[in-house]
Image (tube, rainbow, N blue to C red):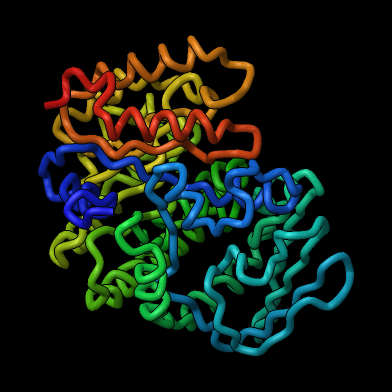
Amino acid sequence: MDVDNSMRERMLTVLSGGKPARLPFITRLETWYKSHTRTNTMPEHLQGLSLNQVHQAVGIGRLKFSAPLAFRLRGVEVKATFNGEPLFQGFEPVIENFPGMWDIVPSDRPGETITEFKTPVGRLGLKHQLLAENVSTGTDPYLKHHLIQSDEDYQVLEYILEKIECVPLFERIHADEAEIGEQGLVVPLINRIPFQQVLLEYLGEIPLFKALQQRSNSVQHLFELLDSQMMEIIQLISSLDVPYVEFPDNLHGPMTSPRLFKSYCLPAYQKYCDALHVQGKKVGSHTDGDMRPLLNLLPETGLDVCESFSPSPLTNCTFDDAWRAWEHGPLIWGAIPSVILEEWVSEADFQSYMHNLFASINRPIIFGIVDLFMHHNSIERAASIASWIEAGNFLSNYR
């Protein structure tokens, strides 16, 4: 691939406010690839290819999320079992994803993973479940049991967070960049912003909403600890030379409502984006939910990119609504809902959707299939989109 016209260079041009001759099309095919590899259903012309080679054969740039740091859990013993059998044990281990624990939770065989965190002030537990269907479709385990289940658990979590240490993984970022090269972009994922962490990882939706009323002091202190940790992370990655970083926030407007967003998310985004912009980094958030309730608030955040933007029919938010609301930013990364690449959608309807989407494009965008390209999505249609973008087909308003 011509470096001057590579997916990476197109992406960097868009991020810097420029207008490349051809727009970037960068997405994730990992789930589709894992699924067809595990079920021996890989299309014949792609059999035996690596994931990178599949991206190249289909003509789609590769998006790879990568962790820029891990966490040493000082003063904590971690034990995990899988289907009742010992899986992991360590004192003060270095964990790439806390509290998600994705580096130890199996994702290639069905079962239940129970993880226990033992500290001098008490214990916490997590429970993940992976079904056979998750294995065959290449999707991740789901969280059945959050860390905080009682009032006493706050004290234990505070102990862990006050002692936790960040461990840089910059060499991995650079190794991933060398692997992908000009074919795509490695995106360092830092933590979710505090509100989204507590919502999705520590408490869960309904328990958090109750806790905001009944345990407001404990929740506020947790937010403050996570804010301090985030600022430490941002300072740590100041020496990481990358053009773009992202919060894996999984924003969903009906859950993180405008009222909650204004109170807890907007000030956090503004603070963190300001600090990252000083480092010369562009900043995005994983916004794969329904953005309609938040359309007018997201431009105030300082975010440069809304990645994995998922328009209707996946959500209630239309592409046109977001395109108008974000005329001056943030950039849209996504916009191609995976549902239109399913067999039940006729070829005529598929082409009509893409024609209408392309006809709306009069400024830079980063195309991507959202939120995930799944086992049942058509790789042939994905390749068609790639060829249309390369040829400039339908992009009548983009000059």
Q: Which quadrant holds the N terminus?
A: bottom left
Q: Residue at x 34, y 72 (%)?
A: 233
237 left or right of 364 in image: right
Q: Position of residue 274 (x, y in %)?
A: 17, 58
Q: Residue at x 71, y 67 (%)?
A: 125
* Residue 300 position (above or below residue 158): above
Q: Position of residue 196 (x, y in %)?
A: 46, 50
* Residue 201 position (above or below residue 389): below
Q: Position of residue 319 (x, y in %)?
A: 34, 22
Q: Which quadrant holds the C terminus?
A: top left
Residue furthest toward the front?
A: 45
Q: Residue at x 26, y 16 (%)?
A: 359
* Residue 247 position (above or below residue 344): below
Asked whether the viewer can see residue 133, the reply is: yes
Q: Residue at x 29, y 39 (%)?
A: 366
Q: Which quadrant of the figure has residue 360? A: top left
Q: Which quadrant of the figure has residue 147? A: bottom right
Q: Position of residue 326 (x, y in %)?
A: 22, 30
97 left or right of 38 in image: left
Q: 337 and 286: which one is in front?
A: 337
392 left or right of 202 in image: left
134 left or right of 82 in image: left
Asked whether the viewer can see residue 283, the reply is: no
